[in-house]
Structures are given as C-alpha cells and as structure tokens.
C-alpha cells in the first residue's frame, strides 16, 4: 500500500497554469499529475499525463506555451528535489 497517493488536475493557458477540475475557457491543454510515495522516506513519483488538448490550437503552439511554463509546476522530467518526474507525450 502506498504511503501517499493523489492526483491533481492542471490546465495550461497562454498565461500559465490553472488548477482544479473546472477547465478555463482559454485552456490549451489539460494534464493530470499522479503522485505516489511508497513510504515517508522514499522519493515521490510524479507521472504527468495529458488528458485533453484544444483542437483549435496547433501542437507546435501548445509545445511552445508548455515549454515556457513547465518549470513553474515541476513538469520537468528527471530527478527533481526528492521526486522522480515522468512527463508523458501531449495529445
């Protein structure tokens, strides 16, 4: 059984990230972050999964927006301050 396990929902907009279940009208992508920690002493595993992408915004534009804002919410793949982060492919 995991020590800690939860999922958060994040919406990427041109101005940055919005958090919560309600998607803003200007969202270009929605991502879920699944966080798992096996024990109080182990690193967290954070798995980012894209669950929605705006059909009105081309992938190249979404890639640029995401790259600009990814560090603000810890969406950088690899080992980051006690976390192992995996970022899936956008839709």
Image (cartoon, grey):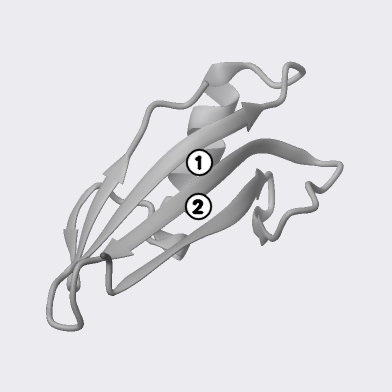
Q: Quick one: SS at disc 2?
A: helix
Observer-nearest residue: 14 or 21?
Answer: 21
Name the side, left or right, on which 63 lies relative to 10.
left
Q: Give the Cα separation between the discs numbered 1 and 2.
A: 5 Å
Name the side, left or right, on which 14 lies relative to 86.
right
Name the side, left or right, on which 36 lies relative to 70.
left
Q: Quick one: SS at disc 1?
A: helix
Circle 2 packing at 10 Å, graded few (<14), some (14-19), many (20+), is: some
Of the numbered discs in the image, which one, if any, rests on residue 25?
none
Question: What residue is shown at x 45% (from left), y 37% (from top)?
Answer: 49
Q: Residue 71, percent across and down?
A: 39, 58
Observer-nearest residue: 15 or 44?
Answer: 44
Vertical arrangement, residue 48 with respect to residue 58, above or below: below
Question: What residue is shown at x 40% (from left), y 44% (from top)?
Answer: 48
Residue under circle 1?
Answer: 66
Vertical arrangement, residue 81 with respect to residue 33, above or below: below
All told, the count of numbered labels is 2
Q: Residue 88, percent across and down?
A: 36, 33
Q: Residue 70, percent across and down?
A: 44, 51
Q: Are marks 1 and 2 in contact (CB under 8 Å)?
A: yes
Residue under circle 2?
Answer: 69
Question: What residue is shown at x 58% (from left), y 25% (from top)?
Answer: 61
Q: Residue furthest right?
A: 25
Q: Residue furthest bottom?
A: 40
Circle 1 packing at 10 Å, graded few (<14), some (14-19), many (20+), is: many
Looking at the rendered image, the quarter that the N terminus falls into is bottom left
Residue 79 position by quadrant: bottom left
Q: Residue 42, percent across and down?
A: 13, 73
């Amino acid at each position: 059984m995991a020590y800690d396990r939860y999922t958060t929902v994040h919406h990427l907009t041109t101005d940055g990230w919005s958090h919560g279940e309600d998607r803003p009208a200007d969202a270009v992508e929605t991502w879920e972050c699944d966080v798992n920690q096996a024990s109080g002493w182990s690193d967290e595993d954070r798995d980012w999964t894209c669950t929605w992408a705006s059909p009105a915004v081309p992938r190249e534009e979404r890639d640029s927006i995401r790259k600009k804002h990814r560090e603000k919410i810890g969406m950088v793949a690899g080992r980051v301050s006690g976390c192992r982060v995996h970022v899936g492919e956008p839709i």
